[in-house]
Amino acid sequence: MSLIPSFFGNRRGGSSSAWDPFSALDAFDPFRNFSTNFPSALIPGGGGENSAFVNTRIDWRETPEAHVFKADLPGLKKEEVKVEVEDDRVLQISGERRVEKEDKDDTWHRVERSSGKFVRRFRLPENARMDEIKAGMENGVLTVTVPKAEVKKPDVKAIEIAG
């Protein structure tokens, strides 16, 4: 028998009368209720049972002629995606992937594909030509092109110095 009590439980099978400060931590799981208690209002599109789709990644690239946005939206049709301009200079890209209908006779072994709504908003710079925005979708990739206004070079006039 050990003279020093074990703080991590008596692993030798005997009983110990020493108080174990870590015994309460054995059942502690900080993420146990994460999926059910997380406020869905904080997740664009409301969260949902399988809400990985809300984190749709969008690339924004600026070229000398335009701002180009690209989003991978595999499995979505162009009718399921909306591209809108709101509040004058805010580009909004949104959509929804619905959950497949379940047949009572089917047995599901794994569900990994995400479903749900997504909304992404981008404040466009002053040089964006809002009236000429174009969008297209090919092979599950949405491309939104926002042309840039031409930057007028200032007229420079040389002033002769007298003296």
Image: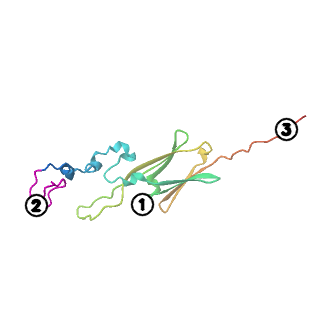
**With 67 as the anchor, is 29 left or right in this view?**
left
Q: Amino acid at mark 2?
A: Gly
**With 30 as the anchor, is 24 left or right in this view?**
left
Q: Disc 1 versus disc 2: distance between alpha carbons?
A: 57 Å
Q: Nearer the viewer, mark 2 or mark 3?
A: 2
For the point 28% across and 59% down, which residue is it? Answer: 102
Q: Quadrant of residue 41?
A: top left
Could you tell me if the residues under marks 1 and 2 are in contact, i.e. CB atoms within 8 Å?
no
Q: Is residue 101 visible?
A: yes
Q: Quadrant of the C terminus?
A: top right
Q: Position of residue 18 (x, y in %)?
A: 13, 50
Tell me which numbered mark, 1 or 2, is placed earlier along the sequence: 2
Q: How is the image coloured?
A: rainbow
Q: Nearer the viewer, mark 1 or mark 3?
A: 3
Residue occupying the far top of the picture: 163
Q: Which residues are magenta?
A: 2-17
Q: Which residue is mark 3?
A: 159
Q: Which residue is mark 2?
A: 13
Q: Nearer the viewer, residue 138 or 62?
A: 62
Q: Main secondary structure of the magenta part?
A: loop
For the point 79% across and 42% down, which residue is it? Answer: 156
Q: Disc 2 versus disc 3: distance between alpha carbons?
A: 97 Å
Q: Which residue is mark 1?
A: 75
